[in-house]
Amino acid sequence: MDKLRMLDPLNAEWVTLVLLAAVGLMALINRSSPRKWRLLASSMLQMRLGKQALREEMDLQDRAFIGLLVVAAAVLALFGWQAFMVSGVSWAFPRLLMVVCAIILGHYLVLRAVGSVLGVAKGIEEYLYTGFLLIILTGILLLPIVTVIAYRAEWRQGLVVAGGGVMLVLVLYRWLRGAWIGLGEGLPLRYIILYFCAAELLPVLLLLDHWRSTPSPLFNT
């Protein structure tokens, strides 16, 4: 049994180190900034963020906020790596981590550019922070899932599907909040639809098309 466990890449030692680092960083943030958790919890459930939260708390230079984004990016990359491995596709974890970080950075740059062109800086800033908050929430919700995937081989396929469902629900919630914010700032509905189709929906459809074209035991059992 020990030999079999060593041959299982999904519970390799580096996976345990990544999980321990994520939990350790979250514990450190909780100890140094416990108020941040209450703020994030309340902000994630609100359709609009208050001015005080945007002005004082949602600071991209805040170490606690950056730390939670780092944890979320690592967990998302780990879940993606696990999903690919279960599907029989080989992707290196560092490569996936760079992809996740590039998506987060690209999301930031694209929205800043859109805000400058359309002149809706306040709404774009709120949507940016809303997106970051939901990325953090996704990482927190996926953390127990990736942990169980690593150490319970018989549950892996079901948990990959469950984790994908969690991500889908939060992406739809993020789009709903984005539309709500845009309409609240007086942005024409056609601009909102154009942005979502070009910048957010198209990449998701391309990813799903790639996933469907890849032979996967998840949908062939």
Image (cartoon, helix red, strand yellow):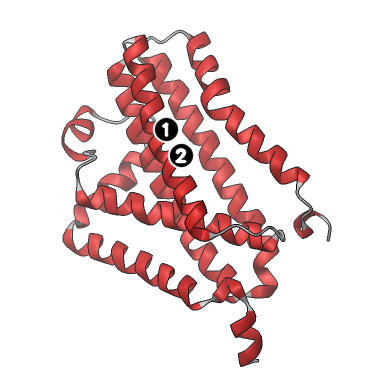
- In the picture as drawn, the residue positioned furthest to the right comes out as 220
Q: Circle 2 is placed at which residue position?
A: 103
Which residue matches tag 1? 107
- Residue at left offset 50%, top offset 19%: 195
Is disc 1 surrounded by few (<14), some (14 to 19) or many (20+) residues within 10 Å? some
Please state, as top left, top right, bottom left or bottom right, where the N terminus lies in the image: bottom right
Within 10 angstroms of label 2, few (less than 14), some, or many (20 or more) residues? Answer: few
Residue 118 in the image: state x and y as whole percent.
Answer: 36, 10
**Residue 197 picture quarter:** top right
Q: Is residue 5 left or right of residue 214?
A: left
Identify the element where label 2 is drawn.
helix
Q: Nearer the viewer, residue 139 or 86?
A: 86
Q: Are marks 2 and 1 in contact (CB under 8 Å)?
A: yes
| Vertical side of 143 occupied by 113: above or below | above
- The relative height of residue 197 versus residue 104 in the rendered view (above or below) is above
Residue at the (77%, 55%) spot, across then down: 216
Q: Position of residue 66 (x, y in %)?
A: 27, 49
- Quadrant housing the C terminus: bottom right
Q: Position of residue 180 (x, y in %)?
A: 44, 22
Q: Amino acid at mark 2?
A: Ile
Question: Is 113 on the left or on the right of 56, as rendered?
Answer: right
**Residue 41 - label:** none
Identify the residue at horizontal 37%, vertical 16% (top origin).
184
Give the side of residue 117 with respect to residue 175, left or right.
left
Residue 152, given in percent of the width and then of the height, sits at 62, 75
Using the image as rendered, state which of residue 23 and residue 93 is in the foreground.
93
The amino acid on which the numbered mark 1 sits, given as a three-letter code, is His
